[in-house]
Structure formats: C-alpha cells, structure tokens
Amino acid sequence: MPDALDPRTADPRELMQALLPAARAKYIKAWEFLADANTPLVPRREARTRASAVADDHAVVAAFLRERARSLQGNDLQNAKHLADELERHAEALHRLATISLIGLAEAKDLRPEALGCGKRYRDATKAVAEGGTNSRPSTGKPAAKAAHPRERARDDKPFSDRGPKVSRDALGTSKHDSPISDDLDPEVRAKLEAMRAALESGE
C-alpha cells in the first residue's frame, strides 16, 4: 500500500477521498452481481467469497483508523471517524451480501447501494426478482424515444460518472483482475494488509 494511502500515517481527508469512492464502487459491483437472478451459481459463490475478502480489508483499515483517532483532533479526528464508520458499514453489508439469499437480497432495502451512500445510478436487478421474472429488459416498442436522448443513454452507460473524484489505479495500488466484483490487490498491497491485520490481532 502506498504510504500516501496508509491508514496509519496518511492525511485522513486525503485517505477518505481516495478510499471511500473506491469502496462505494466495489459495493455497487458486488450488489449488482449478486442481486442479478441470472448470475450463474459458480460465479455467484466466487463473488460471495470475494465480497467477504473485501469486507475483511475494509475492517482492517477501519480498525487502524479507530486506533489512530485517539491521537487526532479537530477535522482530522472527524474525517478519520467518518471514514472508519463508512468502511465498517460497507464491511458489514458485504458480509451480509455473502450470506443472504437472492430473494432476501431483493427485499433487503438496507443493503441497496443508496442505503450505503453509493447513490442511485446503478443497474437495479432486483426489480425483475421481485416481479418473479428475469433481469432481461423487456422491449418497450418505442426505440425512437430512446434514440431521441443520446446523452441520457450515454450517462446511463456510465453509472459511476458522478461518484466523486476519480482516483488513479496507480494511486490505489491495484491491478487488473477478472473478478466479477472488483480489481484484486497486487502482491505488495496484499502483503502489507496482511501484515497490518497480523499486527492488529497481536495488539502491537
């Protein structure tokens, strides 16, 4: 993990600006994938495992922020506490995503992306589940109306376009991965997170 994003030393405001949008994007991807009735069984199981792993990472960062908050004050204290609160909420929700049934997920309003502060611009796959159908889009018979608003369609195709500051992958220390939920961590970042988790568990 780059020193600029180390929860033990980084400026809490900069840390929040970098980590919170990424956490929200990961949650949306997880929710969309797991709420989709057409998601195959094996990828669904893998996605649940990945959601639990992301939740564990969030929990580690939040724990270090809680510990560090004891030595902070003013805006730094408020930013650290807010980020820790948000990451803990995401961790709890991701763990629930990993265990809840498809129907339960469709009915759990507190697990919807907007309930986690992720906004409302996402693909809502639960509507079809609630109606007992699939998530395929029915034909409206009005293609002209859709073509009349190309800018609206372009915005629909970019669900994360209005989700705060864009953070480069280099800054976040991530690399491309074929996970259906999110990018995986590179070995160096993973090693540092594991070291942080071990230090937290040992009470150092």
Image (tube, rainbow, N blue to C red):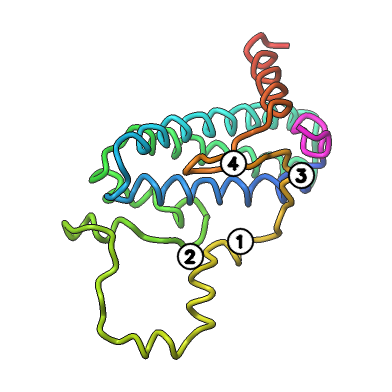
Q: Secondary structure at mark 3?
A: helix
Instruction: Identify the residue under disc 1.
Output: 163
Identify the amino acid type marked 4: Asp
Label ID, residue 104: none
Closer to viewer: mark 2 or mark 4: 4
Closer to viewer: mark 3 or mark 2: 3
Give the class, few, some or many, for how many residues have Cα within 10 Å of label 1's Cα (few <14, many ≥20).
some
In the image, 171: left or right of 34? right
Residue drawn at x 71%, y 40% as measured from the top left: 80
Give the class, few, some or many, for how many residues have Cα within 10 Å of label 4's Cα (few <14, many ≥20).
some
Do residues under tags 2 and 1 come within 8 Å of each other at their CB atoms?
yes
Instruction: Identify the residue under disc 4.
Output: 183
Return the disc, 2 or 4, that comes first in the chain's sequence: 2
Instruction: Identify the residue under disc 2.
Output: 121
Return the disc, 3 or 1, that comes first in the chain's sequence: 1
Q: CA distance from mark 4 to mark 3?
A: 12 Å
